[in-house]
Amino acid sequence: MGLAWLPIAAAQIPAAGQRVLDVRNIPQSAVGLWVHEVGEENPLASHGAETAFNPASVIKLVTTWVALEVLGPAYTWKTEVYVNGPVTGGVLDGDLILKGYGDPYLTTEAFWRMLGALRRAGVKEIAQDLVIDDSYFAVPQENPGAFDGQPFRSYNVAPNALLINFKTVRFEFYASGDKVRVATDPPLGNLSIRNRINVAAGRCRGFQAGISFDIPDRQTLGRVVLSGNFPRACSPYGMSRSVLRHHTFALGLFQALWAQQGGRFNGRVRLDLAPQDAEPILTATSQPLGEVIRSINKYSNNVMTRQLLYTLAADTFGEPATPEHGRQAIVEHLQLRDIDTAGLVIDNGAGLSRQTRITAKSLAQVLLKAFSSPFMAEYVASMSLPGLDGTTRRRFRDRPEAGQMHVKTGRIDDVAAIAGLVQARSGRRFVLVAILNHADVHRGPGEEFQDALLTWLSAQ
């Protein structure tokens, strides 16, 4: 029997959820809800299911599912290494050229392994420059702080065809006497840090442990100024921030890791195209997509999801990849799979957006289709297990519900959403989609509503 996708009048918002709405003065018009037992024809509960709401990061479940279907779980990204001169006695008399194809998980460790392979291939010294070819993606200019005024937060990093370590540095702070020592991971020689932090007494509290982070030069993003009063009780403390431009970040990390490998380099960095008529001397391969989406969904990584949007664009429409083509690829695939796209707005595919919209019904369709997909195991395993891991690791901890659900949550100002699969104690399995769009629901009421629904479903 086919699924009946018409909302049913008999079962609206479950009483457990309605009690939260009543206490918090949240109107029913702010709710998009669909609860469906796997294998059944009709939903168990439905309300506002055909109204398009902002789902925040829950939209990642759409982007990752389409990627699994279109690219396959074994899909990998490549990063190519070229030279434009001879290598004699270990010396490259020319440029070293790195061409990226959008690997979303090219971490410091992966980059180090790639440079190690280059050393083993016989290159010890690079006489000229490091050239970056990031032309596979055509990323429009954007203000990284446009979403929330936080341009240096890691979640606001823009996509790039050669994204290395998410263009992010972890700053670590240690109180030592009356001074604060600052360490960075990875260490970048072309990043200047001005440390004006004072050590303070008292408890560990305050926004960012009292540390103010600023980058005065918005063109190069190469100079960090740290100030404020850091409570000694907070030591050690860490924060991750985005620094430098994509190509200058690549230069700084290359210089550090290449020196660790015993290599020599005194050149500069520039953007250019890789040679069209030459073969790479080395090609690095990423982790497969089936593993990559675990980092995306469990930990809600925005820039990795945006990389996936561009990858879908390139795979479907060719290079250079554009966000418009990425959105088109997702919509066309959903329509091909008979999923209702009315009211759907993908925007960047990650949900860090005020424009993203989807109905609870459409998202439930995606989840039910995915559950019957050959790639169901990879997809479900990519979601957070409440009480155990990911973004919901602190919810339902030490309770019977822990580990009995695979969910993805989303939260931005005035938005709280959850979607996923719940296995009840009876063994019955349910798809749940619950979206709230209302003032301040992100401050606690949204999570209360979600937990009430999850507890109710677990008892079915």
Image (cartoon, helix red, strand yellow):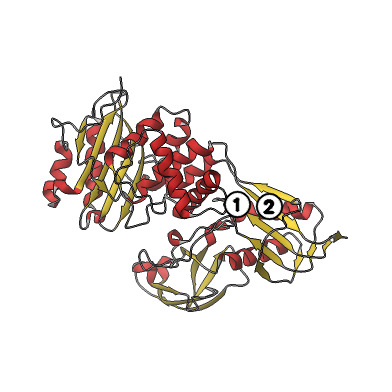
Percent position of residue 107, x then y:
58, 54
Query: Considering the image in quadrants, where does the N terminus appear?
Result: top left
> Which residue is identified by label 2?
80
Percent position of residue 382, x then y:
45, 39
Q: Residues within 10 Å of mark 1 (few under 14, many from 20)?
A: many
Query: Considering the image in quadrants, where does the C terminus appear?
Result: top left
Which residue of the protein is positioned furthest toward the top in this rendering?
1
> Which of these two is toward me, 13 or 347?
347
Is residue 187 something one can see in this rendering?
Answer: no
Find residue 200 and name its label. Answer: none
**In the drawing, does residue 27 fall left or right of residue 375?**
left
**In the drawing, does residue 151 fall left or right of residue 109?**
left
Circle 2 SS class = strand
Label 1 sits on what residue type? Answer: Tyr
> Which residue is identified by label 1?
101
Circle 1 SS class = loop
> Which of these two is toward me, 17 or 367?
367
**In the drawing, does residue 213 fall left or right of residue 459?**
right
Percent position of residue 257, x then y:
67, 61
Residue pictured at 23% horizontal, 40% vertical: 49
Label 2 sits on what residue type? Answer: Glu
Per the model, the C-alpha gap separating discs 2 and 1 is 8 Å
Percent position of residue 127, x then y:
79, 68
> Which of these two is toward me, 427 or 415?
415
- CB within 8 Å, label 2 to label 1: yes
